[in-house]
Amino acid sequence: MHLYEVPLWFALVGLALYTVLGGADFGAGFWQLVAGRGKQADEVRDEAHHAMAPVWEANHVWLIFVLTVVWTAYPAAFGSIASTLSRAAASSQAGSTRPRSRSACSPSRAAPIPQPSF
């Protein structure tokens, strides 16, 4: 094994850990998707939220680890991949943000802002 293959193995192990340990994320998303409607569905969604709360962002550390290893070890490849995927990432981000309805932003429905007491 050559020295330039070591970061590749680290990246592959990190991707495997991200995939395997992401089962909790995917499982909670599945239960929220198939919960249906009604009071019982709200209870299922609440349970999924409460179950995921302590570990919500912990699994993303593996993805950040993989990106950091590839960026550090293979900067030319990372630059090529990042520039190729930047348009797809931007369009997915633009599609995931949608404007709020006017009724949700109206001042009559806004909650009062608590004032700090000193």
Image: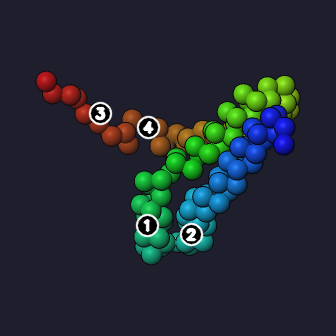
Of badges 2 and 3, nearer the viewer stands 2
Q: Secondary structure at mark 3?
A: loop
Residue 34 vertical placement versus 50 (above, below): below
| Dot 2 crowding, Cα within 10 Å, few <14, some 14–19, many 20+ | some
Q: Is residue 91 above or below residue 39?
A: above
Q: Callout 4: helix, strand or loop? A: loop
Question: Could you say which disc has been placed on residue 24 in the image?
Answer: none
Q: Is residue 117 visible?
A: yes
The answer to the question of whether label 1 and label 2 lie on touching residues, with beta carbons closer than 8 A, is yes
Q: Amino acid at mark 3?
A: Ile
Q: Amino acid at mark 1?
A: Glu
Residue 47 has which mark? 1
Q: Amino acid at mark 4?
A: Ser
The residue lying at 61 percent from left, 57 percent from top is 22
Q: Do the CB atoms of the residues marked 4 and 1 lie less than 8 Å apart?
A: no
Residue lying farthest to the bottom in this orientation: 40
Q: 16 or 103: nearer the eye?
A: 16
Q: Residues within 10 Å of mark 4 (few under 14, many from 20)?
A: few
Q: Which mark is residue 113?
A: 3
